[in-house]
Amino acid sequence: MRNVIIQCLLCASVTFGIWIAVFSIYLHYNHVKKQAKIQEKGNLFIWSLGEKLQSKPDSAHIPRAYNVRVERQSEDEPAEPKSLLRLGENFNYSIPELIHGYSTYGFNPIISKNLGHYRNVPDTRNVMCRKKTYPAKLPTASIIICFHNEEFSALFRTLSSIMTLTSQYILEEIILVDDMSDFDDLKEKLDYHLEIFRGKIKLIRNKKREGLIRARMTGASHASGDVLVFLDSHCEVNKVWLEPLLNAIAKDPKMVVCPLIDVIDYLSLEYQPSPIVRGAFNWHLEFKWDPIFSYEIEGPEGPTTPIRSPAMAGGIFAISRHYFNEIGQYDKGMNLWGGENLELSLRIWMCGGQLYVIPCSRVGHINRQHMTNHSEVIKAMEYNNLRLVHIWLDEYKEQFFLRRPALKSAAYGNISERVELRKRLGCKSFQWYLDTIFPELEASETIS
């Protein structure tokens, strides 16, 4: 009798285990099926602490400025960094990988890894853009991407999106510049995965940390395309993104052009469309996005009209290689990054060029929420801004020092070479820039 009872219990246990397995498979199948349906509808399935966040195609998000923001205290005191790491209400502080990823990369590395090396992003172009055609013969492009300790999947999605959504006949090459990364997955693992792009990618590894500015100059020196396209290492390009940029430069080689920068949310990695905006800045030399004037898109081209922009964000733009060299590349006396975007913007406008945003070109960019070596970056930005102020602002440099008096006697290195460049190029005054390109800045002279 005892043996019979034991056998019955064993049979019941086995049967129960089989039912549990079948039920688990059923639940998993339903979960996968539901996820596939969401992706087929064009929405992202996003794992975020047990919640499903779906994209809102109709919502518009203004991209965040690239520059590090600082909390202003007394003007005589050095600026202290303001925390840029903002975590959502549902953030689970108990997930070590997540908190480590935020502090290291500034965005959600778990979702980034789950997204893999490529994904389809929504076509955020205006309907009129989708109907536009471009000449069969366009200049070729060398795309330059510099990185330092970038999250592997984000970097590889940048490359995969370029290779998938760029016409090969206009893509001369992608030049990757590794600015002395420390992470192991950016070494042999990256080399291995780049083999699938053999023939199109050049990988340059700096032997010491140069910073973004000098790393980009290194990349440009190895380029052979007609046009240089500078891209950040955490982007995803959109459909027909390159042709509008190259077409504008083909018409005017002294026109420097930027795409509209769509937002890739740092928390969910959801791809969100940006409205049409222009680049600008204030007297603190902080970059910002400004709305455009309605009359600018009321002509026959409507929302496809190129938008004149006083400044560029700097992370993503295209410029004729010959013109880049002609106007003096970047200021190699600047450190790391910061301020180089405004310096180049002023030099373009004041020295005979033009700077435009091309609405029919869209590129997504992750709005990272932190910066490692924060104090080092702020120190570099102050140094770089001082170089810009003393070279380009003329008598208006006092507007900057009214707001940052502590920097008036700060060192900024030797600028004689850049001052001579300004003379040689026959550049106009900063007053001309204010009168002609950015009168809104002069109107904002009240100290704030």
Image (cartoon, helix red, strand yellow):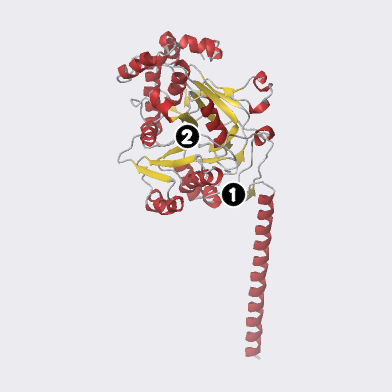
Going by the image, does 132 lie left or right of 267? right
Identify the residue under disc 2. 229
The residue at the far bottom in this view is 1
In the rendered image, the quadrant that contains the N terminus is: bottom right
Going by the image, does 401 lie left or right of 40? left
For the residues carrying marks 1 and 2, which lies nearer the camera in this image? 2
Q: CA distance from mark 1 to mark 2?
A: 37 Å
Q: Nearer the viewer, residue 435 or 370?
A: 435
Please state the horizontal and vertical placement of residue 110, each as a whole percent of the image.
52, 49
Q: Is residue 34 above or below residue 303?
A: below
Whether label 1 touches label 2, CB < 8 Å: no
Asked if residue 434 can be seen in this view, the reply is yes
Residue 49: assigned label: 1
Q: Is residue 276 above or below residue 49?
A: above
Instruction: Report the amino acid beneath label 1.
Output: Leu
Q: Is residue 265 above or below residue 28?
A: above
